[in-house]
Image (cartoon, grey):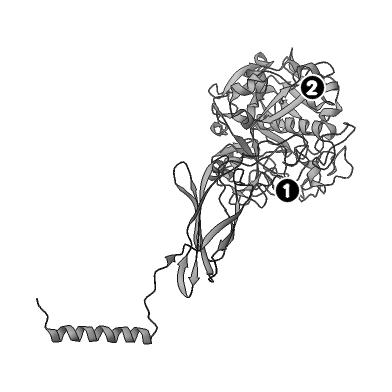
């Protein structure tokens, strides 16, 4: 269709009128933002450095925009994984963080990332944007287990994928080695967990024996498993042994999470609370809770039920192997410490060089008269609160605020991994969890019923040699002529290392807190493993305390028993 000249003129007049109206009402069409070659983003700072960046890195930038003024109004921040170009985190059109920001997402260790940054604003009243700054940076190594005697030893930074799987988040200072919260994480209910990175240990075979080992740091060494590229063979080649605590479900694990405090009323892991007692009465915090844990029976296996609830079935209660790892970490930390700066319970004389706790039956510690716990349980006056000591750092496994509390006394802590079965024919034998089994496979129904799919029958450690039915055996840690730790690279003795003494010692040894491992084969009842001791065990309580006493099974109820939740991720 052809338009007449008059029609075309009318259309042109209409357009001119519309433009005048828009200008009158300031409806001017926006000019597109232009990339100004004279506006450059300069990266001033990557926290930790470009090739050793923190896993929660902060970035600072400045702008170079030449002689013309540029008003900076927003910034794009973006991090991508170099290997697959997937966006890991971004904050686009950010009007609050113009020149500095902290990435809130935990990045993977030893990984290359691309950082993209663009600035937006106005120049000469017109929209303008900078060229995109693109640079590559690499995160540093995971902290590992640390250096014995130094700040942060015994805990560490967890890989990001484990946190995502378990639903854990960082705390303020989680990735900073000198922070009180180093290696500490919280779940959605603010329960505090501590991450213990996988480690290997080694002994100088020329310096066996307690009298030398206790005074010579070179006799006992611990290194991060990551130092061996997470390869057991490489570790074994230089006589380092991966601890049994880092094998689960037939796989080598990067570390384990364990509640910083004993699980307390309300299924919590928080400071200064009433620890749950595995019973139905006689305490203000029974495991059989009519409001919260209605499915519980007021017995030891409630620890499994509650811990599974706390970890959303991704974990359960802690294993004896985990307690063994914590005890060995404490011991080697004390050997290497030279002052109280990074080890508050350090004793230069070596007489009381170990974590303290609630163990004197009066809310204090037998060896440290300054320790005093708060108590909120109106039915048990001797039962201190979780993390309730006035000198908190003296009661952690590493003598620092970032450590795991109350492993010496307070409550005996039930643990998975080893049981002692009933019947006199089984005297001198333990049932030990298979390497191929995961702790998450245990339930209240299978934990003690001789499940051959979960356990192997094993001979007891040499410290219990000659055991018979209806007889108790008490083996103290330490020995004047033999190594109290097993030196096997695999097999049952690797599993026993740090869990039971390798040789029998009949008298208490100061360097090991005067702790012992007790076993009693009753002819009629099985036994659950307990660690740490309770509020009244005085010098017997401690990180190396163990008890397998028949007639004390997973179906037993006891107000002096508690537990921790744990998970591998």
Q: Could you say where residue 393 lies in the image, as x and y percent from the top left? A: 79, 44
Residue at the image position 62 percent from the left and 18 percent from the top: 491
Q: Could you say where residue 83 lies in the image, as x and y percent from the top left? A: 46, 41
Residue indicated by mark 2: 474
Looking at the image, is mark 2 or mark 1 nearer the viewer?
1
Residue reaching furthest to the top: 466
Q: Seen in the image, is 84 located left or right of residue 256?
A: left
- SS assignment at label 1: loop
Q: Seen in the image, is 1 located left or right of residue 480?
A: left
Residue at the image position 82 percent from the left and 49 percent from the top: 390
Q: How many marks?
A: 2
Whether 129 is drawn above or below 325: the answer is below
Which quadrant would the C terminus be assigned to in this image?
top right
Which quadrant would the N terminus be assigned to in this image?
bottom left
Whether 215 is drawn above or below 121: the answer is above
Residue indicated by mark 1: 180
Q: Residues within 10 Å of mark 2 (few under 14, many from 20)?
A: some
- SS assignment at label 2: strand
Q: Could you say where residue 297 lies in the image, as x and y percent from the top left? A: 61, 40
Q: Could you say where residue 135 lies in the image, as x and y percent from the top left? A: 52, 49
The residues tagged by marks 2 and 1 sit, at their Cα atoms, a distance apart of 37 Å
Query: Hey, which quadrant is residue 306 in on the image?
Result: top right
Residue 198 in view, yes or no: yes
Whether 105 is drawn above or below 12: the answer is above
């Amino acid at each position: 269709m052809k338009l007449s000249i008059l029609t075309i003129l009318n259309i042109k007049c209409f357009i001119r009128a519309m433009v005048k109206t828009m200008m009158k009402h300031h409806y001017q069409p926006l000019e597109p933002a232009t990339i100004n070659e004279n506006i450059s983003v300069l990266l001033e700072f990557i926290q930790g450095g470009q090739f050793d960046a923190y896993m929660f890195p902060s970035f600072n930038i400045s702008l170079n925009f030449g002689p013309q003024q540029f008003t900076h109004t927003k910034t794009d921040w973006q991090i991508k994984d170099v290997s697959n170009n997937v966006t890991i985190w971004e904050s686009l059109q950010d009007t609050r963080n113009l020149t500095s920001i902290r990435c809130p997402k935990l990045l993977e260790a030893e990984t290359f990332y691309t950082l993209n940054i663009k600035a937006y604003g106005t120049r000469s009243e017109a929209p303008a944007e900078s060229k995109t700054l693109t640079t590559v940076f690499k995160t540093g190594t995971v902290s590992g287990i640390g250096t014995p005697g130094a700040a942060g030893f015994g805990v560490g930074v967890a890989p990001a994928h484990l946190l995502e799987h378990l639903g854990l988040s960082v705390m303020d200072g989680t990735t900073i080695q000198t922070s009180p919260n180093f290696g500490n994480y919280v779940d959605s209910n603010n329960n505090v967990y501590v991450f213990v990175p996988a480690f290997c240990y080694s002994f100088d075979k020329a310096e066996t024996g307690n009298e030398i080992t206790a005074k010579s740091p070179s006799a006992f060494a611990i290194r991060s498993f990551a130092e061996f590229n997470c390869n057991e063979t490489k570790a074994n080649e230089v006589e380092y042994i991966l601890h049994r605590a880092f094998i689960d479900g037939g796989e080598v694990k990067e570390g384990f999470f364990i509640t910083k405090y004993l699980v307390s009323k309300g299924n919590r892991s928080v400071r200064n609370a009433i620890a749950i007692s595995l019973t139905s009465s006689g305490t203000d915090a029974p495991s059989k809770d009519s409001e919260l844990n209605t499915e519980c029976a007021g017995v030891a296996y409630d620890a499994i039920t509650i811990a599974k609830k706390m970890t959303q079935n991704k974990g359960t209660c802690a294993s004896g192997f985990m307690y063994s790892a914590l005890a060995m970490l404490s011991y080697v930390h004390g050997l290497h410490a030279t002052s109280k700066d990074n080890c508050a319970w350090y004793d230069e004389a070596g007489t009381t060089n170990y974590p303290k706790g609630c163990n004197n039956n009066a809310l204090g510690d037998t060896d440290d008269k300054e320790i005093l716990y708060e108590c909120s349980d109106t039915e048990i006056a001797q039962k201190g609160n979780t993390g309730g000591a006035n000198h908190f750092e003296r009661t952690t496994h590493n003598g620092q605020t970032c450590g795991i509390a109350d492993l010496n006394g307070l409550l005996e802590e039930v643990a998975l991994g080893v049981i002692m079965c009933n019947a006199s024919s089984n005297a001198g034998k333990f049932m030990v969890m298979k390497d191929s089994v995961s702790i998450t496979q245990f339930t209240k129904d299978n934990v003690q019923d001789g499940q051959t799919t979960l356990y192997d029958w094993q001979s007891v450690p040499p410290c219990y040699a000659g055991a018979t039915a209806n007889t108790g055996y008490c083996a103290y840690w330490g020995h004047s002529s033999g190594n109290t730790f097993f030196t096997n690279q695999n097999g049952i003795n690797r599993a026993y290392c740090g869990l039971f003494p390798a040789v029998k010692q009949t008298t208490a040894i100061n360097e090991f807190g005067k702790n012992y491992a007790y076993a009693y084969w009753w002819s009629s009842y099985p036994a659950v493993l307990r660690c740490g001791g309770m509020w009244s065990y005085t010098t017997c309580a401690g990180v190396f305390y163990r008890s397998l006493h028949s007639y004390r099974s997973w179906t037993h109820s006891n107000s002096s028993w508690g537990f921790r939740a744990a998970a591998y991720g």
